[in-house]
Image: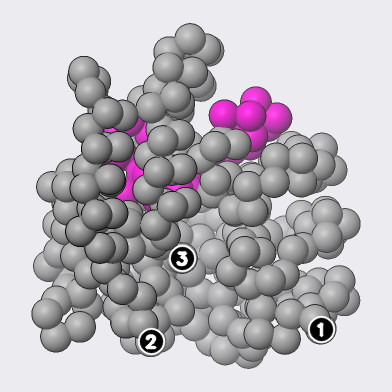
Amino acid sequence: MSPKQIHDRLRAIMPPAVTPFNKRGDVDERAFRANLQRYTGIGLAGVVVAGTTGEAPFLNPEERLRLIEIARSVMKSEELVVAGTGLESTRATIDLSRQAIARGADVLLLLTPGYYRNKMDAPALLGHFRTVADAVKRPVLLYSIPQCTGTKMPVEVITALARHKNIAGLKESSGDLEYVRTILGAVPRNFRVFCGNVPILLEALRAGGAGGIMGQACFAPKLCVAFYEAWRQGQQERAEELFARLVPLATEINVRYGAPAVKAAMDLAGFRGGDPRSPLLPVPAAARRSIARTFKTSLAGLSL
């Protein structure tokens, strides 16, 4: 796809795919492929590989690249493969991003550097992202998740970066609705803002957001697609009904128990989740029972 075709497809819902591991702790490629096969062709815009839910900090570069390669081989040609390639240094980010493109990535998801967070001021962030965007030939999504990186990008930085020809949008996961609204009011209309926080997703869409990239799409992808399509088609009552089912899947699973809970929910839904990679721990038995109750209640009587 050309950059314009990719940009046109940057909307709707995408799951941040989990990375399954086998008993030895290695990436389970067969399980990863099986999950993606259930995502393709159901109305998702694509899939995100090596994001936060995919335990990207625990993957080495070759593991990330192999996952990208598998994803491109499974997803349909019109479905995007978004690859998390943001590392701490600008040079390493460029190197990984170029290799990701060679393996089939359509879009690069660039995490805000966070180790030297007290030095990540506006000039540092502008220089980092512009240098990476200048060096690659694929659209870039900025990735704001300050609860993990400790770095919250100033709106004026995002607005300035939005003018770069290769920077197509932003995934914003802070959960700060007013921050998201302010960004949407300041950037061009064609700058794609994805919400990574389900409780504010509906209001973010109403404010002009492009879609959602959230863990619930990993284990309830058809519910997420149905919600988005209802909203897109102006079926407000139906969208609100489905959104009410989505919110507990976020607050009672992801928010309460973290990324390992997405894997537990996937196991319950018949996907291949499994245990997280150390030092993350699997959710305990009591949490699994709570997740199962939430899952059952949210999806009760729903036919998709």
Q: Position of residue 11 (x, y in %)?
A: 52, 40
Quadrant location of the C terminus in the rendered image = top left
User: Where in the figure is residue 154, as x and y percent of width and height?
Assistant: 83, 60
Q: CA distance from mark 2 to mark 1?
A: 25 Å
Give me the C-alpha separation between circle 2 and circle 3.
14 Å
Which region shows up in magenta? Answer: 202-225
Q: Circle 1 is placed at which residue position?
A: 119
| Mark 2 / mark 1, whichever is N-terminal | 2
The answer to whether residue 272 is left or right of residue 90 is: left
Q: Quadrant of residue 126?
A: bottom right
Q: Decide if residue 138 is on the left or right side of residue 54.
A: right
Query: In the image, what residue type sits under mark 3?
Result: Thr
Vertical arrangement, residue 197 with respect to residue 158, above or below:
above
Please say if the residues under marks 2 and 1 sit with CB atoms less than 8 Å apart.
Answer: no
- Mark 2 Cα shell of 10 Å, populated few (<14), some (14-19), many (≥20): few
Q: Which residue is mark 3?
A: 52
- Residue topped by disc 2: 60
Q: Position of residue 96 (x, y in %)?
A: 49, 83
What is the three-letter code of the residue carrying label 1? Lys
Residue at 40% in and 22% down: 242
The numbered mark, 3 or 1, whose residue comes first in the sequence reads 3
